[in-house]
Image (spheres, coloured by chain):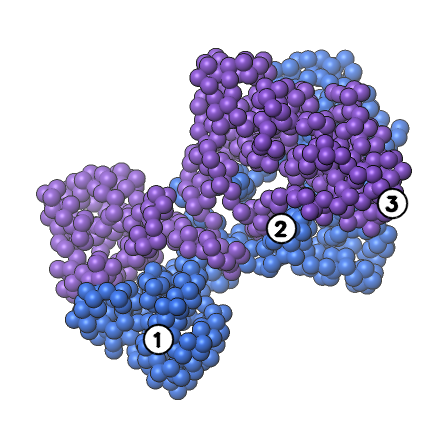
Chain colours: A purple, B blue
Amino acid sequence: MDLIKIKKALISVSDKKNLDKILKTLQVYNVEILSTGGTFKYIKDLGYQCTEVSDYTKSQEILDGRVKTLHPKIHGGLLAKADNKEHINQISKENIDLINLLIVNLYPFEKKLLENADEETLVENIDIGGPSMLRSAAKNFKFTTVISDPEQYDECINELTKNQGSTSLNFRKKMSTNAFLETAYYDSIISNWMNKEQNKFPKKITISGSIQNELRYGENPHQQATIYNVNYKKDLLSGIEQLQGKELSYNNYLDMYAAISISKYLDNAKKTCVIVKHNNPCGCAASNNLSNAYKLALNADPISAFGGVVCFNDEIDKKLAEKLSDTFYEIIISNKFTSDALDVFRKKKNLRLIITKHHMGEKLTYNIIGEKILIQDKDIKELENKDLKVVTKIKPTKKQIKDLKFAFNICRFVKSNAIVIVKNNQSLGIGAGQTNRLASSKIACQNAKLFFKNNVKNSVAASDAFFPFADGLKELVKLGVKSIIQPGGSIKDNEVIKAADKAKISMIFTGIRNFKH
Amino acid sequence: MDLIKIKKALISVSDKKNLDKILKTLQVYNVEILSTGGTFKYIKDLGYQCTEVSDYTKSQEILDGRVKTLHPKIHGGLLAKADNKEHINQISKENIDLINLLIVNLYPFEKKLLENADEETLVENIDIGGPSMLRSAAKNFKFTTVISDPEQYDECINELTKNQGSTSLNFRKKMSTNAFLETAYYDSIISNWMNKEQNKFPKKITISGSIQNELRYGENPHQQATIYNVNYKKDLLSGIEQLQGKELSYNNYLDMYAAISISKYLDNAKKTCVIVKHNNPCGCAASNNLSNAYKLALNADPISAFGGVVCFNDEIDKKLAEKLSDTFYEIIISNKFTSDALDVFRKKKNLRLIITKHHMGEKLTYNIIGEKILIQDKDIKELENKDLKVVTKIKPTKKQIKDLKFAFNICRFVKSNAIVIVKNNQSLGIGAGQTNRLASSKIACQNAKLFFKNNVKNSVAASDAFFPFADGLKELVKLGVKSIIQPGGSIKDNEVIKAADKAKISMIFTGIRNFKH
């Protein structure tokens, strides 16, 4: 068991929560206590005996508390190997006692950051002495016990009680791990804050998350999963609030993120509705009326919509809530619900309702595959009028250009290869995730034909990358597509342009590819 | 500019590289130098003046060097605010000099970890004094300059030269950021090592990467991108080596990872070939002969294979290399190439050739969406015989069971919804990424019909999740599929089983869903 008796403890905590509980146990085992500044006063006020660190080190606290524990008498006591004769001789010569237990928690840097504190306050909240002690004690886990979080007190009390005032090596090692998880997290938050306006791709990076909650399971039931928050980032899911319904699942988070992403890019001068299934949109529409936007998005592919995630950009009223209740959905997302609407939804108690808050956009994406992290700019380049280069004899009409932009902004969020057919602010067919472009074109056309019969004439289409041959374009022409938007850049562009001219349709090259994998 | 004159520097470096360069500059500006142990000796040997830290602190180095700089005279000098009268009074009373420049690099914990050093060695290589000083200096960036990496020496020399021995606030802040990036990274490596056998989902996590290289661009040309290595992990791309060809792109990495993942799961008693395009497989086959496996995988969808990533599990010889040269591929991956084969490939100098090394599997996946990190077990549950529950009147034959397993193991790597049709160890059709299961079934069937005409009879199929209705199954039956493997679990399972019985085919429920988004 490698039990080590706790004789002397150093306590220096920013968060005083539950300190009395552990003090009581330490008293039972006659543990001598050293402490600093505020913690010292707090312990004395609770009626326990305690020595101030400066009395022990004979060195005054200086620089407004910046330097108090950075002293050989403290670190020697934390770092000495208790089974090493030379170490023991050295510390006794220097009048250093072994410190067997360290209880420290750090200045609340992250809390201040989330409170939007100014730079000076944040810098003052970078703890120096605390992490140094935590690291010394954690390194010396063979002999020293380190407690870095008030939530570990109960476990520590149990350990001490079980072993009559001693701790086991297993316990010390576990607590040492926790201490390093804490210091790594702490400096990751600081470094990401300091780096936020500097180097986009620094030599070394850390991404840090604090646990939000365990999930029922991951993508599939046999996979355990947990969700973490990266607190120094603000993105599309920041500040969302769940009003009712079952717990959010792993796949729900993916679909919500996809739905809100698309929603942000659609024409927000209008009311919009986006329906997502398996991380791909299956219906998107914009209208002057939210209820109508929903109807159009649903009709775009009523089969796929079943069990989907529906995202709106405006208030959901009672009537719309009733319509939504006719179909089984996983999640309804909006920025506002009338109280009548909430009453309607309350009857479907499993249905998840999500309110989105104002969200800033994170500028980078992180893709982790095994031991590689791929970091890149988010694909957030806006399509501007100057990007639109007409390459055909026929020019698109103003109305077509509107639909082309609408299709482009859906298409960038569809898994590659992607083809999106649109007419009057409504998606008619979305060809997703195919290993060749012709297949995506066919899927989009089949969907359009299935649900829109002859109403597909005069539609437009977007392609996320160039057509390598004219075949995909010809499929779209056959359906009734009259204008196409795509990046261009194929060695067969001329052949594709010729086919468009021959079919008397217009085509725009943007130079902007939108692969998404 | 907030220039601060460098009068006193503390140097304590584990890596002595290029130290002479910066010492020369410090001499030009008459900077006094403090140093510790090995660094002190190194500086003296180079002929520069230098004071040993223990002479300055009047405190002996103890505990085999574990405690030498953890002293108020050092940290007071790094942390004092030079424009704060009280601070200046306090340090002068304690005979503490301001230390304006800190040059530190840390014990090579990560290097030792990658060398598979034992626990004791690793613990000894957890630097305590170094990170403490780096953090003190970095916190006090308004006054103190911190250099945490030999690669910063040139920039520091330029800064000192430009400002005649002073540094600017901008420079100090930048170097402070680098120091915190370093300490965060350092502790992240330590904590992930310590935690590796403990808590799967700790309260706080950090994921750390060191830069591998900038990429030409990200998923698309308008997105800047960089790839990092998570050095404490070993996974499928660990130790790969590029033998020739263009630089690997962002999308190449994704496709390689997908191709090697599938390859690992196919029947490795046989020779296998996997062709991936846009992160989905388009052709997979196993055979007793590698060349034949390639032929079968290519024939599974020769249109999509163009521009794909091809992964083999055995040695590529000259004849196969010649066949592969007939088609345009992005990457050829194998664990071995004959030298004849390499000669053939050398003629296609843009073609990327990748050798895979032995790779262990990382057990978790990390999915970052905006400010959320979703962590889950990898979907690596092996399909065992006990998972196979026949639910139909007809039982699958032994040969069908082999094909069903083959289909299952491809299907888990296809984006959802996924349907994979297989016959004789060859994929005939892969329906990927659709928002409803019927659509995926149709795509798989269309592919099979297109490329295999009447050879589709007696094939089998896998579905990554249950059939919500019998319609998808009926499509497969119409094609000629005679046995199906799927998890089951739909409320309409009975209807689906009835349809299978009616069509006189066999069906297996596994209870294992394999969504992949």
Left or right of A484, for residue B194: left
> Which of pointers 1 and 2 lies earlier in the amino acid sequence?
1
Image quadrant assignment for residue A61:
bottom left
Left or right of A18, for residue B438: right
- Establish whether labels 2 and 3 are both on one chain: no
The residue at which mark 1 appears reads as: B6
Label 3 resides on the chain identified as A
Callout 2 amino acid: Gln
Left or right of A407, for residue B63: left
Instruction: Say what secondary structure mark 2 lies in.
Output: loop
Q: How crowded is mark 1: few (under 14 residues within 10 Å), some or many (20 or more)?
A: many
Instruction: Say what secondary structure mark 3 lies in.
Output: helix
Callout 3 amino acid: Glu
Instruction: Say what secondary structure mark 1 lies in.
Output: loop
Q: Do the residues labelled 1 and 2 touch (CB within 8 Å)?
A: no
Label 1 resides on the chain identified as B
Residue under the image location 44 percent in, 34 percent down: A239
The residue at which mark 3 appears reads as: A495
What x and y, as percent, mark residue B219? 65, 48
**Disc on res. B223:** 2
